[in-house]
């Protein structure tokens, strides 16, 4: 993980301060504030600020004053009901802001979630750090033969080493040219010099979102089918969310992360299977891919 001395000093200073407040706080998340969690080789993610907690979700659903006197069990039951029936608005009452350092190609995938407020480090005004992502050997895989956007078999040792050398050489060369173009001999504008950098160069941003949209992001990006390089960020965020809103997190884990959805045709097939009626893909009304996904879901359960 790479934090600049200025960033580390800023974090240390922030962690050394405390503020009195009347708003609800979450001790477990307070302990994580300003702590940079390492991700990948040079990346990190940290919670900068947050608003709301489990009680805020309940309060919004009941439109009540104060935190009430209901038992935690009742609050959890309501939160689970909201999650189960896709009542999203109460979860939007909670917000969280992250500081993330991530490779540019991961950022371009991440930014497709257009439900957050984002402010990215500007290479027009500042010079990017000489940090670029180099995968580990076990994460170098060939193109999948049955998934156009996924990975297949891990590359063999000599091939993987060749790929790693190419990645390092290209990143080193383009960053060297970046520095050269910025230097006094050329003095190219920063907004132009940056175009030569490889997509594994690290960038940084502040990313703020509400809990409902964060859950949507995590459902997709913490899934085993998500690209590894974004999934590890999502997995780090899951632990932070669990510390922040444990009741909502448990409902999310049950009804989103650990759940599957069946189509109407799949439900028809499931009913026949439960009634011990024979059923095959050809007569099920499902395509071959749907049939395979249906069977995989049953095995997963």
Image (tube, helix red, strand yellow):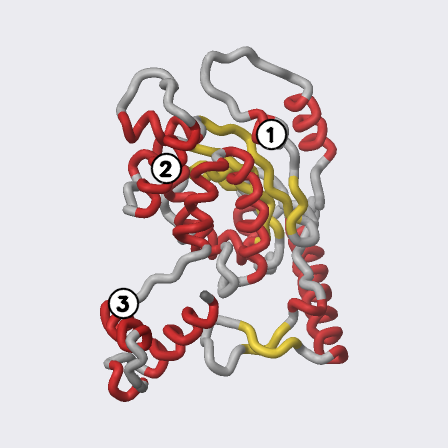
Q: Residue at x 66, y 28 (%)?
A: 11
Q: What's the CA distance linking mark 1 and mark 3?
A: 42 Å
Q: Nearer the viewer, mark 1 or mark 3?
A: 3
Q: From the viewer's side, name the closer residue of 159 and 27.
A: 27
**Residue 285, image quadrant:** bottom left
Q: Residues within 10 Å of mark 3 (few under 14, many from 20)?
A: few
Q: Position of residue 17 (x, y in %)?
A: 64, 17
Residue designated by label 1:
33
Q: Does dot 3 land on a helix, a strand or a loop?
A: loop
Q: From the viewer's side, name the closer residue of 121 and 263.
A: 263
- Indicate which disc, 1 or 2, sits on the residue closer to the N terminus: 1
Q: Position of residue 111 (x, y in %)?
A: 44, 50
CB within 8 Å, label 1 to label 3: no
**Residue 100, image quadrant:** top right
Q: Residues within 10 Å of mark 1 (few under 14, many from 20)?
A: some
CB within 8 Å, label 2 to label 3: no
- Indicate which disc, 1 or 3, sits on the residue closer to the N terminus: 1
Q: Does dot 2 land on a helix, a strand or a loop?
A: helix
Residue designated by label 2:
77
Q: Does dot 1 land on a helix, a strand or a loop?
A: loop
Q: Position of residue 121 (x, y in %)?
A: 54, 40
* Quadrant showing the C terminus: bottom left
Res 193 seen here: no
Q: Position of residue 113 (x, y in %)?
A: 40, 50
Left of 27 or right of it: where is 68? left
Residue designated by label 3:
263
Q: Residue at x 70, y 39 (%)?
A: 3
């Amino acid at each position: 993980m790479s934090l600049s001395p200025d960033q580390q000093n800023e974090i240390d200073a922030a962690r050394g301060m405390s503020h009195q407040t009347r708003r609800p706080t979450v001790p477990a998340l307070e302990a994580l504030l300003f702590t940079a969690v390492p991700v990948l080789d040079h990346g990190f993610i940290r919670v900068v600020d947050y608003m709301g907690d489990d009680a805020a979700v309940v309060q919004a659903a009941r439109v009540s004053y104060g935190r009430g006197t209901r038992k935690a069990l009742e609050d959890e039951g309501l939160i689970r009901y909201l999650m189960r029936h896709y009542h999203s608005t109460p979860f939007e009452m909670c917000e969280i802001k992250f500081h993330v350092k991530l490779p540019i190609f991961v950022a371009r995938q991440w930014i497709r979630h257009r439900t957050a407020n984002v402010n990215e480090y500007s290479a027009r005004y500042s010079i990017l750090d000489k940090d670029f992502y180099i995968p580990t050997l076990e994460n170098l895989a060939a193109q999948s033969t049955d998934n156009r956007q996924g990975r297949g078999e891990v590359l063999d040792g000599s091939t993987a080493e060749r790929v790693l050398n190419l990645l390092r050489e290209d990143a080193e060369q383009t960053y060297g040219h970046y520095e050269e173009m910025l230097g006094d001999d050329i003095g190219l504008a920063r907004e132009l010099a940056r175009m030569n950098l490889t997509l594994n160069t690290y960038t940084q941003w502040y990313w703020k979102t509400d809990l409902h949209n964060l859950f949507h992001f995590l459902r997709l990006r913490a899934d085993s089918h998500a690209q590894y390089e974004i999934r590890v960020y999502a997995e780090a965020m899951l632990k932070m969310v669990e510390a922040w809103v444990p009741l909502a997190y448990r409902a999310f884990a049950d009804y989103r992360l650990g759940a599957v959805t069946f189509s109407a045709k799949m439900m028809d097939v499931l009913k026949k299977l439960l009634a011990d009626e024979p059923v095959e893909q050809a007569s099920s009304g499902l395509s071959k891919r749907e049939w395979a996904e249906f069977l995989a879901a049953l095995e997963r359960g």
